[in-house]
Amino acid sequence: MPTSIGLQAKWLNWHANLITIQRRQCVIAVHDATRYAVFIPCLTKSDFAKLQWHFEDVFINSLLKSGLPHELVETATQHLAALQFDTECNRSVQGTMNQIAQDIDYGLGYTNTAVSDISPYRYSAELSHRPCTIKGLKDYQWPDKAMAELLSNLHNKA
């Protein structure tokens, strides 16, 4: 597989899950290769019709909150694709999503914060700035740094 096709395939793989926190419907999306997290809180029925927009909005703004250079954020914007759903699962990514969901629930409860009061951009950036384990890798991976590296590789190949 050519490098540019491999990078594009690596870029497109995300897992997402619908969770309920404080009786509110929320979506957690985690990038397979980097474990970068996108947390979209307090979705209503009508919001699900615009899920693509919500995902892109939180993802791009969380990249900005993470301090990524403008050219990498622009690369992410240019390479966004329509959300597609399938039934293939990666248990390692699902484990990361479950851990993130528990951390969100615990963190909000510990600080006595309503999920409706948080900034999804800042919260997603914070969730992505912590070490994660990935099956098959010896060392921990920092999702925000791994996403910056992936975007840098995409930017250099463009």
Image: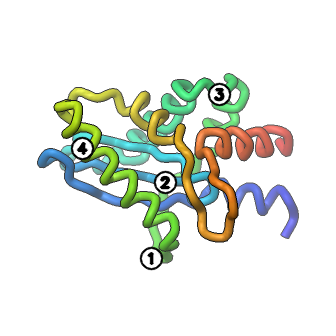
Q: Is residue 47 left or right of residue 91?
A: left
Q: Is residue 64 left or right of residue 20?
A: right
Instruction: Report how far apart the C-alphas of labels 2 and 3 lie in the structure.
Output: 18 Å
Q: Amino acid at mark 2?
A: Val
Residue identifier under label 1? 87
Residue identifier under label 3? 68
Task: Give the image location of residue 94, x and y in percent.
Answer: 44, 66
Instruction: Report how far apart the C-alphas of labels 2 and 1 lie in the structure.
Output: 15 Å
Residue identifier under label 2? 30
Q: Amino acid at mark 3?
A: Leu
Residue identifier under label 4? 43
Q: Amino acid at mark 4?
A: Leu
Which is more N-terminal, label 3 or label 2?
2
Which is more N-terminal, label 1 or label 2?
2
Secondary structure, mark 4, is: strand
Q: Amino acid at mark 1?
A: Thr
